[in-house]
Amino acid sequence: MSAIVRTEGLVKRYDGTLAVAGLDLDVEEGEIFGLVGPNGAGKTTTLRILATLLDPSGGEAEIAGLSVRRNPKEVRRVLGFMPDVFGVYDDMKVWEYLDFFGRCYGLPADRRRRLIGDLLELVDLADKRDHYVQSLSRGMQQRLCLAHALVHEPSVLLLDEPASGLDPRARVELRELLRELRAMGKTIVISSHILPELEELCTSVAIVDHGRVLAQGRVSEIERRLRAGAVLRVRLLDHADLDRAREHFEAQPDVASVNVLDDGTIEIGFRGSDVETAKLLGDAVGAGLPIVTFARAASDLEELFLQVTDRDAPVVLQ
Amino acid sequence: MTGSAPEIVEGSPAVEPVVTAPVDARRRLVGRPAGIGRFLTEGIGGIVAVGVKELRGRMRGRRAFVILTVYLLLLGTFAWMMEMILEKEYATILSGTAAFASAQIGQGIFIALMMLETLLVVALAPAFTAGAISTEREKQTLDLLATTPISSLAIVIGKLFSALTYLFILVFASIPLTAVVFVYGGVSPDDVIRGYAVVLATALGLGSVGLFFSALVKRTQAATIISYFGVLAVTLGSYFVFYFWTSMTGGGGAFTNGVGPIRGKPPEVLVYLNPYYAQADVMCGVENGFGEWCTRIAQVTDNSVLGGTTTNAGGVTVDPAPGVVGADGGGFKPMPVPAEPAVPGQPEPDRRVAQDDVSPFGVVRDTFWPKSAVSWLVVAVVLTLASVQLVSPTRRLRLRLPGSARRSMRSSI
C-alpha cells in the first residue's frame, strides 16, 4: 500500500451541517494531488482534519500510516501545512520567522542556521533575510509561509489554496517551486477552486463537492473519461448560416445538444471520440458550412468540473 | 493502514527513492525516546521557542529601554517627593529622636513605593497578557503554531512568561530604588522581600487572568475590557463587598457581633485576591503596630492584632480560649502565645501564634499575605490550564464548542 495520505469515510459535522460527508481519498507518494471543488465543498475542512487542526466526526484519516486522531503529534512531524488564510507576526524578521518554527520543531541551533539559508534560497527570498515579514509582498509571504512548512523536512505538504490572491507571475513562481518540491520527493496535496491552476501541475486530482469525492484519478484518466462529454465550440464565417448549421449538427450522431450563443458561437454537446469528432468536422465542411473555428472548449477539466459539480444534477463518475 | 512500510511494487525499483522518505520519518518517530524526559525536553523547548519569539519582538530597538528609563526616572522622582513630604511632616513633630523620625520616613517611602508597584502590576499585567492568544487568532497565526509539535501548554506558558517578562523587568528594576529605604532605616530586607513577593504573585495571577480571557474571547479588545472588569472586581469590588458586609454586621471592624442584619464578620477569602489587603498585611509588619495598615488588616483577620493593649507585649501566656473577646466577632485578641505543648487528643487552638511570628512591636506577622499570594498562584495555575484547553485545536471545552464550530465553519467555506 503506497498511499501516503488516506481518508476513509471521513465525516465532519458542524452544528448539524455536514461539511464533509464520507470522503475517501488516496494520495500516492510523490504525487501532486489536487483537491478541487467549489467554495464550501469541504476542501478546507478536509485539509484541516489532515493537518490535525480539527477532529473528524467520523471516519479515518491517516498520513504516512499515522492516524491524525490518535497520533496528532507524530503526524505534525511528517507534514507541513499552509492554511488558506494565514497571518504573519509583526515585529519579526524573515530569518527569525523561520528560526522560530525551527525551534518549535526542536531543531538544534546549527541545523536551524543552515536550514534557514537553504530554505530562503529555495523560495527565492535569500536577499530578504533581514527584512521584516510584514514588509514582504503577498507572494513573498506566501513563499515564506511555504518555507515555514518545510522547516522540519516533512514528507507531506498540505497547501490550502496556495495561489489565491497571487498575481500571475507569483503563480508561475509558486508552480515552479511546487515542481521542485515534488522532485525532492515530497507529496503535495493542494486545494483550489480554480481548475486551470491545478491542471498543469497536478498528477492526480479529486473533484469534491458537498463533502464527497465526485471523481478521482490521474488528470489524463479523468480527461479520457471526459471525452464522452466534451463541448465543441464552432464559429461560422457568416451568421446567416447559423440556422442551417444548427439543423445540420442536430442531425448528427452522438450530438447531445446544440446551442447558439448570442455572439454566434455554436456550442455542441458531443459524446463521440476523437475519430468521430474529426468525422463531424469533415461532414460539416462537406455540407458547405463556412467553418472558421472548430475546437474543444478551452479547459477540459473546467468543463468536467462544471458538469460534476452541477448543483441540480450532480453526476458521479465512476 | 497500519504502521507497515509501503510495499515496493515488484518490477518497479525506480520508485524506491520516493518511498523512503516517510519510512525514515516513521522510523525516526518510533526511535524517539518516550516518557517524561522527552515530554520535558519538548515542553521546555516549546516554551523557549515561544518566549524567544515574543521577547525578540518586545525588546527590539530602543523602545523597551527608553520606557524602562523613563519609568525609573518617574519612580525616582516619586520616591524623592515622598521623602520631601514625610520630612516636612516629621519636622513639625517635636518629640522623638532623629533616628525614630528617619525610620518613620523610610517606612513611609517603602509603603508608598510598594503601593505604587502594586498599582503598576494591577494596571499593566492584564494589558500585557490580554492580547497574547487573541492576537494570534486575529492575525491568523495560531494555526501555524498549532500544526507544530509544540504543545498547547508550552504555547500558553511561553506566552504568559514572555508577556510578563517585561513587567517583571519593570518590577525588578525598581528594587534598587526601593533599597534606598535602608538608608533611612525602619524597614528590614525581609519586608522588601515580602512586598515584592506579593507584587510578583499578583502579577502572575492577573497575567493569567488576561491570558485566560485572551484565549476565551476572540478579540483582544474584548479580552482586555473583560480582564479589567476582573481586576476591578478583585480590587475595588472585593473591598466594597467586604465593607458592605462589615457595615451590615453593625459596625466597622472590631466588636461587630450580631448587631446588624448579617451575623458574623465577612470571610477572609473574600479579599484573598485583593493585592492591597495583602500589602496592608506586609505594611502592618513594617509599622509599629498602631498604624492604619494594622487596623485595616485586623478587620480582615482575627490574628493580626496589635499587642500591648490586652496583654503584655513579649508573650505572656494567655489562654486564647474560644468564647472570649473576639472569638467569632473578629476583633482584638489576646496577644501572642508562646509555644505550649498541645494537650494530647485535643487540637491546638488555631488562633495561637508562635513567639517568633511576633515583631518587636507586638504585631503578628504574615497572617494574610501568604494566603493571598498562594491564592494568586492557584488562580494562575487553574487559568493557565483552562487556557491550554481553549488553545488546543482539537480538545476544546464543551463550553466553547458552538461558537468555535461556527467560526471554523465560516473559515472553511
Image: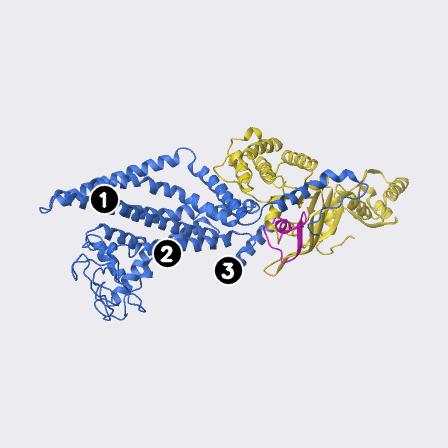
Chain colours: A yellow, B blue
Q: Are marks 2 and 3 on the same chain?
A: yes
Under tag 2, what secondary structure?
A: helix
Marks 2/3: CA–CA distance: 25 Å
Sooner in the amino-acid sequence: mark 1 or mark 2: 1
Q: Are marks 1 and 3 on the same chain?
A: yes
> Which mark is in front, 1 or 3?
1
Indicate the position of residue A50 as horizontal and vertical percent values.
Answer: 63, 49
Indicate the position of residue A185 as horizontal and vertical percent values.
Answer: 69, 38
> Which mark is in front, 1 or 2?
2
Mark 3 is on which residue type? Leu
Chain letter of the residue carrying label 1? B
Residue A60 lies in the magenta stretch: yes
The residue pinned by badge 3 equals B399
The residue lying furthest to the top in this view is A127
Sooner in the amino-acid sequence: mark 2 or mark 3: 2
Chain letter of the residue carrying label 3? B
Chain letter of the residue carrying label 2? B
Q: Are marks 1 and 2 on the same chain?
A: yes
Under tag 1, what secondary structure?
A: helix
The residue pinned by badge 1 equals B109
Mark 1 is on which residue type? Ile
- Residue shown at the point (43%, 53%) measured from the top left: B381
Q: Is residue B295 left or right of residue B23?
A: left
